[in-house]
Image (spheres, rainbow, N blue to C red):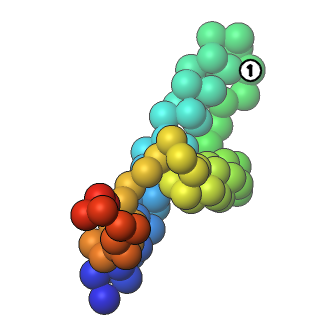
């Protein structure tokens, strides 16, 4: 049960991080396009496309060695000699 709650917390965290990163990326893109005097209007389909890609990348990255979030670390099988 604890693992399920931890996993749901990770999903909520991914949703929030994806929204923040997407807003930052599209804001920087809009600033650059305004400086270049190009069209910099907001489109929802662009926001959703970038968000889906970022959320997928964050989700995949969360299960790599570098993003060890401890999912399922509550219970473990001792391997011997009282070492975890």
Q: Considering only vertical position in the picture, is 67 above or below 15?
A: above
Q: Nearer the viewer, residue 11 or 3?
A: 3
Quadrant holding the C terminus = bottom left
Q: Considering only vertical position in the picture, is 43 above or below 40?
A: below
Residue at position x 63%, y 11% in the image? 35
Badge 1 local density, few (<14 within 10 Å), some, or many (20+)?
A: few
Residue 45 coordinates in the image, percent (x, y): 70, 56
Residue 79 coordinates in the image, percent (x, y): 40, 68
Residue at position x 67%, y 20% in the image? 33
- Within the image, what quadrant is residue 9 found in? bottom left
10 lies left or right of 82:
right
Count of marks placed on residues: 1
Residue at position x 31%, y 76% in the image? 75
Q: Considering only vertical position in the picture, is 29 above or below 23?
A: above
Q: Nearer the viewer, residue 57 or 63?
A: 63
- Within the image, what quadrant is residue 29 found in? top right
Residue at position x 56%, y 20% in the image? 31
From where the camera sits, is residue 65 visible?
A: yes
73 lies left or right of 25:
left
For disc 1, the marked residue is: 38
Residue 64 coordinates in the image, percent (x, y): 57, 51
In the rendered image, the residue lying farthest to the front is 81
Q: Secondary structure at mark 1?
A: loop
Residue 38 coordinates in the image, percent (x, y): 74, 20
In the rendered image, the residue lying farthest to the bottom is 1
From where the camera sits, is residue 6 visible?
A: no
């Amino acid at each position: 049960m604890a693992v399920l709650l931890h996993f749901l917390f990770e999903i909520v965290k991914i949703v929030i991080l994806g929204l923040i990163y997407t807003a930052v990326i599209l804001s920087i893109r809009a600033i650059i396009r305004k400086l270049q005097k190009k069209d910099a209007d907001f489109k929802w389909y662009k926001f959703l496309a970038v968000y889906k890609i970022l959320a997928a990348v964050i989700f995949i990255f969360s299960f790599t060695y570098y993003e060890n979030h401890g999912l399922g670390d509550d219970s473990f099988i001792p391997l011997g000699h009282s070492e975890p």
